Image (spheres, rainbow, N blue to C red):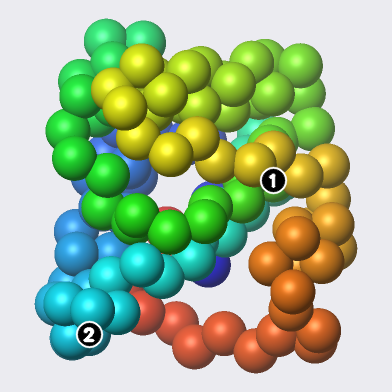
Amino acid sequence: MTRMTGVLSSDDIEQHDRAVLLFLAGLFASERQVRGLYDFSQVEALAVPNSKLTQRGQRPAIIGGFRVVVPPASTAGLDFVRLIAEQLRAAGHREPVIADTLEEAYRLLGLDKPQFDQVGEAL
């Protein structure tokens, strides 16, 4: 699970990618099909240029398994998440499912009262 709050920047995305890569490095190659949950519901502003999203979307997907995204509450936030999904689809990656709430995301992932341990720095 990744949870972002406040202003989401290009640096945040890079830090996230590094943390996920370090986490996955500790798993066996056969376990790389992990599921991902991205909670952006508390993101207040977006500071990521479309060119950065396009560049990121053209790189290989870090997580190959099922991914669920909870977008920021604003219309701009939902547009941002849809743009991410479009970039992933255009690059041939599996598109994430968009959930309206964190509770819906848990249901989609089959999680009941999940517990998460922090990996990497808080973003």
Residue ID at (35%, 35%):
93
Residue 10 to residue 120: above or below: above
Seen from the viewer's position, the closer of residues 57 and 6 is 57
Quadrant hosting residue 97: top right
Question: Is residue 48 visible from the viewing direction of this image?
Answer: no
Mark 1 residue crowding within 10 angstroms, few (<14) / some (14–19) / many (20+): many
First-in-chain label (2 vs 1): 2
Seen from the viewer's position, the closer of residues 52 and 8 is 52
Question: Between marks 2 and 1, how big is the CA–CA gap?
Answer: 26 Å
Q: In this view, does 9 lie to the left or right of 6?
A: left
Residue at numbered disc 2 = 27
Residue at numbered disc 1 = 70
Residue 33 image offset from top left, x and y in percent:
36, 67
Label pair 2/1, CB-CB below 8 angstroms: no
Quadrant hosting residue 122: bottom left
- Specify the amino acid type for callout 2: Leu
